[in-house]
Amino acid sequence: NWILLDDQLVKEEQVNISKEDRGYQFGDGVYEVIRIYEGDLFTGQEHIDRFYESAQKIRLVIPYTKDVLQKMVHELVEANEVINGYVYMQITRGASPRQHQFPEQGQPVLTGYTKLMERPIELMRNGVHAKFVEDVRWLRCDIKSLNLLGNVLAKQEAMENDCYEAVLHRGETVTEGSSSNVYGIKDGVIYTHPADNHILNGITRREIIAVCAELGIPFEEKAFTKEAAHTMDELFISSTTAEVLPVTVLDAQPIGDGTPGETTRRLQQAFERRLG
Ligand code: PDD
């Protein structure tokens, strides 16, 4: 398998990341996950754009143009002959003697690789269970940062309770999932937290908004409470790798009748049409 290292495709053995890389020591970097369907990047441009936005928000200058990076990512996918899978890429502020402030001279380090992955058909059909976990992350969740400890601890807590996802809440307000966005549907209207500093503005979320406009489903970027979540007719999550997944049980209580709902199904079908 080929790896993207800075702006070159290299073999895995040629990748030698420093023990003092700031990604490794501080989580000082940003990342993206881009889905590959039938050999093609899905919403590749949007992911590349968000990668540059995240980098800019942490004052890291990516030393390549978007066009060069996009071309390299395409070459990586082709070289690895990926049919269904994803690209993971990250850029860090590079290696320098350990000190918190930015290094005076430092070269960012970019790495990217591909993984094979099929669509989560079973989960999409049957839905998943979720658990509420207090959102104790920092206040710049709009940045797709390598610092994922809050997300990691939340997901682990969910998994240990036989749940697929943690639904995070700040006090009474539902924010997002540990690695997904979260939506509630009540009386035909879809609600989700506004894309401010408390959540990641998901690319799948943007696709869902477009789908809703297409289907004429009312969509409101309006946060809802933990209590309201339990009384929703339907609940679902979205992400690049999970697509649209119904949440059928939340904190051991069924949502609606405890099976995937009609509107979520319609969204899944409309989303699927955009992949083709
Ligand atoms: N996670 N919120 C968080 C905290 C996320 O980590 C993700 C994605 C999303 C959904 O964003 P998008 O639709 O652009 O994938 C929302 C990726 C897939 C991950 O870390 O694996």
Image (cartoon, helix red, strand yellow):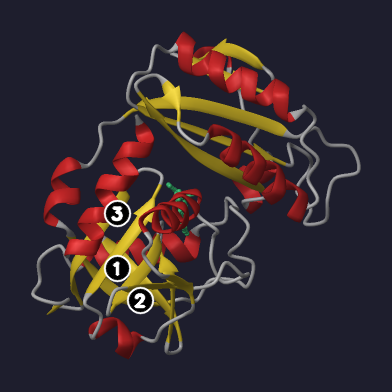
Q: Quadrant of the N terminus?
A: top left
Circle 1 SS class: helix
Q: For the residues marked 3 and 2, what is the alpha-carbon distance in whole angstroms?
A: 26 Å
The residue at the point 32 percent across, 38 percent down is 273
Q: Is residue 215 above or below residue 73?
A: below
Label 1 with label 2: CB-CB less than 8 Å: yes
Q: Is residue 178 above or below residue 184?
A: above
List x then y, in percent, for residue 179.
41, 56
Q: Residue 267, labelled with which disc?
A: 3
Q: For the residues marked 1 and 2, what is the alpha-carbon distance in whole angstroms?
A: 8 Å
Q: Is residue 186 shown left or right of residue 87?
A: left
Identify the mark nearer the N-term, 3 or 2. 2
The residue at the point 17 percent across, 50 percent down is 123
List x then y, in percent, for residue 44.
54, 33
* Residue 163 appearing in the image: no
Q: Which residue is mark 1?
A: 157
Which quarter of the picture shows residue 106? Answer: top right
Which quarter of the picture shows residue 176? Answer: bottom left
Q: Which residue is mark 2?
A: 133
